[in-house]
Image (cartoon, helix red, strand yellow):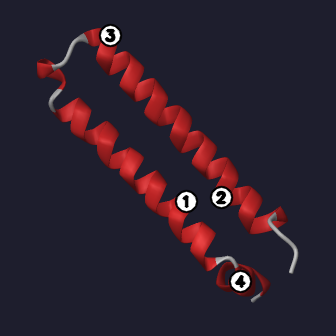
Amino acid sequence: MDLLILMQDRALPLLLLALFLMLNVVFVIGIWKRRHHFSKGFLAFASSLAFLLMTSSVILFMFTMFIGYNQ
């Protein structure tokens, strides 16, 4: 029950981070479905940047969830 209360208190930051994470996943899926149209350098750069952003989003999600800001 405590986890649900934490999620309700921090709904907006968690929603924004989850939306950013989903957009990165859609971006990676999109570039990999059309990988024949892009150069290998661009694919490597875009996918590594997207995975870096996804990792940072997950870390920020956990930080906001468990450490977060005090009320």
Residue 37 lies left or right of residue 42; in this view the side is: left
Query: Which comes sooner in the sequence, label 3 or label 4?
Result: 4
Query: Which comes sooner in the sequence, label 3 or label 2?
Result: 3
Residue beneath the point at 76% across and 57% down = 63
Residue 31, above or below 29: above
Residue beneath the point at 38% across and 17% down = 44
Query: Which comes sooner in the sequence, label 1 or label 4?
Result: 4
Q: For the residues marked 3 and 2, what is the alpha-carbon distance in whole angstroms?
A: 30 Å
Percent from the top left, x then y, of residue 39?
22, 12
Name the amino acid, label 1: Leu
Secondary structure at numbered mark 3: helix
Residue 42, above or below 10: above
Q: Using the image, tell me which numbered label, if any, was put on residue 49.
A: none
Q: Using the image, tell me which numbered label, if any, was put on residue 9.
A: 4
Q: Residues within 10 Å of mark 1 (few under 14, many from 20)?
A: some
Q: Which residue is mark 1?
A: 17
Name the amino acid, label 2: Phe
Secondary structure at numbered mark 1: helix
Percent from the top left, x then y, of residue 70?
88, 74
Residue 66, above or below 35: below
Q: Which residue is mark 2?
A: 61
Point out the image quarter for the C terminus: bottom right
Tags 2 and 1 touching, CB below 8 Å:
yes
Secondary structure at numbered mark 2: helix
Q: Residues within 10 Å of mark 3 (few under 14, many from 20)?
A: few
Residue 68 lies left or right of residue 9; in this view the side is: right
Q: Using the image, tell me which numbered label, if any, was put on residue 41.
A: 3
Percent from the top left, x then y, of residue 2?
79, 85
Residue 37, above or below 26: above
